Structures are given as C-alpha cells and as structure tokens.
Amino acid sequence: MGYVSFIQEILLILAMLVGGVWALFKYGISNSNSISLEVEFDSKQERIPNDSSYYIHTLISIKNVGGAAYRIFWGNSPPFSVTPVNIMPNGRQEYEEASYYSITTAVANENQGRPLVGNIEMTGIGAGNSRNVNFVSRVTDPGLYLLKINIPIVEQKTKVFGIPITIHGGANMIEQRFFFVHGS
C-alpha cells in the first residue's frame, strides 16, 4: 500500500466520522433535545355573590413534549392578558385595551398563619412533564374576550455527548383563545 492510498484511507475514515457526528446532531441529539410545548386553555366563567362583575378563571397547562428540560423566566412583564373584542357589522374584529395579569403564588407565612402572595419569576419543566398556571380575570361586561399567554423560553438544560450544557435563547411562544362571557 502506497503513501497516497494510506492518506486516502485516513481521509475516508475522517469523512465517515464527520458524517456520523453530523447525522447524530441532525437526527439524534437535536431532535431528542428540542423544546416542544403543548399549551392547553381551560376557561370558565365564575360569579361571586353580591358582585356585579364577571370572572374568567383560566387554567393553562404547559406540557414539555420535547426531549430536554427548560426554564421559563417570567420576568417583570405580566404574561397573561385579557382583551375585550368587538365584532363589527362588517365582520371585522376590534380590540379594546388589554388587562394584564402576573403569575402569583401563595406561600404560608409560619409566623402569622396567613398566606403571602408574590410573583413567580421562574418555572422549570422537565422533558415529558407539565406545569399548570391559574389566572382569574375580572371583567365588567358579558361579551367576547381574547385570552393570551406569552411564554418566554429562555434557557434549556441538555446534554451533548454526556456533557451538561445550557442553551440560552430568547424565543417566545404565544398562545391565544377566544372566550365568551355570558350575561346573567
């Protein structure tokens, strides 16, 4: 075997290795570690005795159907909005000013025995897991409303060749649904 044949064999082996690594990233690692969400809305109308307002209780279920865990940093911007919608005679939709809602949590205060309410700043969702987020929105009139959640996906924890890495992003996923509030 000559010198040229030896170099050709080495280059062929390297090309096969590079092709294998490329295929692993293209079809193996990248697909199994991708972030993929399913978002479900479950909204219902509520009334409180002696209160003329209407309330929309919305349960949003966020399921990670991808292969990697990730974190949502909700930050200072309220992620949930409720917008009154008017349907004009020509069928066009007009949107009024939206009301915005933060994610809150109640935690027990051991000293005084009453809950404290604060904003949730981060939610982690592992691969195959889900998180539920509740919102209660007060509206004064029956009608059509647009409910919208803005999910900022900014950090993903994954492994490449067994080495833990963090992928920082800035993607937002926006899901929205219409909801009709009925009068009494």
Image (spheres, helix red, strand yellow):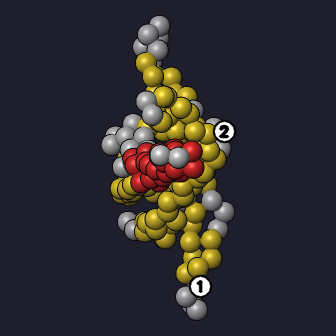
Side of 44 where 161 appears, left or right: right
The one nearer the camera, 168 or 82, is 168
Count of numbered labels shown in the rendering: 2
Tag on residue 128? none
Task: Please indicate, yes or no, whether residue 30 appears anywhere in the rendered image.
Answer: no
Q: Amino acid at mark 1?
A: Arg
Q: Is residue 4 above or below residue 72?
A: below
Q: Residues within 10 Å of mark 1 (few under 14, many from 20)?
A: few
Q: Give the image location of residue 51, x and y in percent.
A: 45, 50
Task: Report which residue position mark 2 lands on.
Answer: 76
Residue nearest the viewer, comparing 99 with 14: 14
Q: Distance from label 1 to label 2 (Cα)?
A: 33 Å
- Can residue 182 be seen here? The reply is yes
Asked if labels 2 and 1 touch by Cβ distance under 8 angstroms, the answer is: no
Residue 92: give its label.
1
Compared with residue 162, is residue 135 higher up or lower down, i.e. above or below?
Answer: below
In the visual, does 130 lie left or right of 159? Answer: left
Which residue is pictured at 55% across the width and 88% down the height?
Answer: 91
Residue depicted at 48% across the width and 28% down the height: 163
How far across and how far down the image is residue 172, in percent? 58, 52
SS assignment at label 2: loop
Please state which amino acid type lies under the numbered disc 2: Asn
Element at label 1: loop
Q: In the picture, which quadrant includes the C terminus? A: bottom left
Give the residue displayed 49% in from the left and 62% down from the top: 176
Q: Residue at x 58, y 63 (%)?
A: 83
